[in-house]
Amino acid sequence: MTRSGPQRYPGASTTYWYQTKWGGDSMESNVIVWHTTEGTSLPSYGGGAEAPNFTAKPNFAAKRLEWYQHFDFDTSSRALVNKPGGVATNTLNVCQVEIVGTCDPSTHKKWGSAPHLYTPELPDWAIRDLAAFAKWANANHGVPLSSGLTFKAYPSSYGNSSVRMSGAAWNAFKGHCGHQHVPENDHGDPGDFPMAAILAAAKGGTTTTAKEEDPMAGYTKKDIADAVLNTDGVFGIPESWRTDNPSNKEWKFSSVVVNIGEQIRALSAKVDALSAKVDELKKEA
């Protein structure tokens, strides 16, 4: 299937990219499935065998979410159970997002004052950044800014609860849902998730503080430099640049920058040599 729209979420890191290893089906995603990792760090996802499309990890010092992308937006990921027969899950036009945190009140209590996200009590900055993703998915892929579903509190959302969709309802669904709603699955995440607040913010509403924040707040100069130099974008390189390795036709941006620096230094040396030669000719004249 032909995929349309940009496949990478702006600013998302592809440090943990699993599509090369695990492939996936091409599709036109019109559903976002929200999960919680039930941990405080970026999961390994079994080396990608159980990975979603995206992971949103909190940066509490900067009050923002850091995004990691594991599969293209319109490529099936692997965070849902898909039982034999029945309906398709991972491959049914769904993009999946894991939020690093918990929906479990007992886990929330156990973690205590240690910084973590608890979905029933997400801070405004987390709602803001989740809304930004939902808005981007709507603008670029047409994922409706709607849900129409009840997000049930964990643990009553676990198993075959009243909110889990039937196969027919799942096949017809478009918009935003949680793992707790997906048929053939028993997980109850993301629990009592503030879906209405996230969608309202995505539509142009505000979170409770209604503050306009600097989008670069919390980023250091090193953060910005790392983001630029470690980008996964590649560029076609002219043959005249590829003296060391002629077969390497595409370079990462960081390699391009290094090569440009080397060329500038070489050019500067030539200019200095020519200037010295001109000075000698002037003396001889």
Image (cartoon, grey):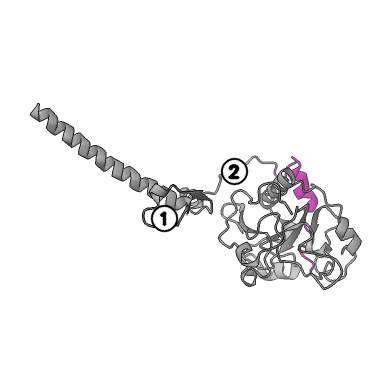
Mark 2 lies on residue: 215
Specify start and end residues of the magenta stretch as a single range.
Answer: 187-209
Give left or right: position of 224 versus 104.
left
The residue sitting at 85% across, 55% down in the picture is 173
Res 184 quadrant in image: bottom right
Circle 2: element type: loop
Can you say whether 108 is above or below 3 in the image? Answer: below
Query: Does any portion of residue 195 appear in the rendered image?
Result: yes
- Of labels 1 and 2, the one closer to you: 1
Amino acid tagged 1:
Pro
Counting from the top left corner in percent of width and height, residue 228 is at 49, 49
The residue closer to the viewer here, 223 or 23, is: 23
The residue closer to the viewer here, 180 or 280, is: 280
Mark 1 lies on residue: 246
Counting from the top left corner in percent of width and height, residue 159 is at 84, 71
Amino acid tagged 2:
Pro
Give left or right: position of 193 versus 19.
right
C-alpha separation, residue under disc 1 versus residue under disc 2: 41 Å
Res 182 quadrant in image: bottom right
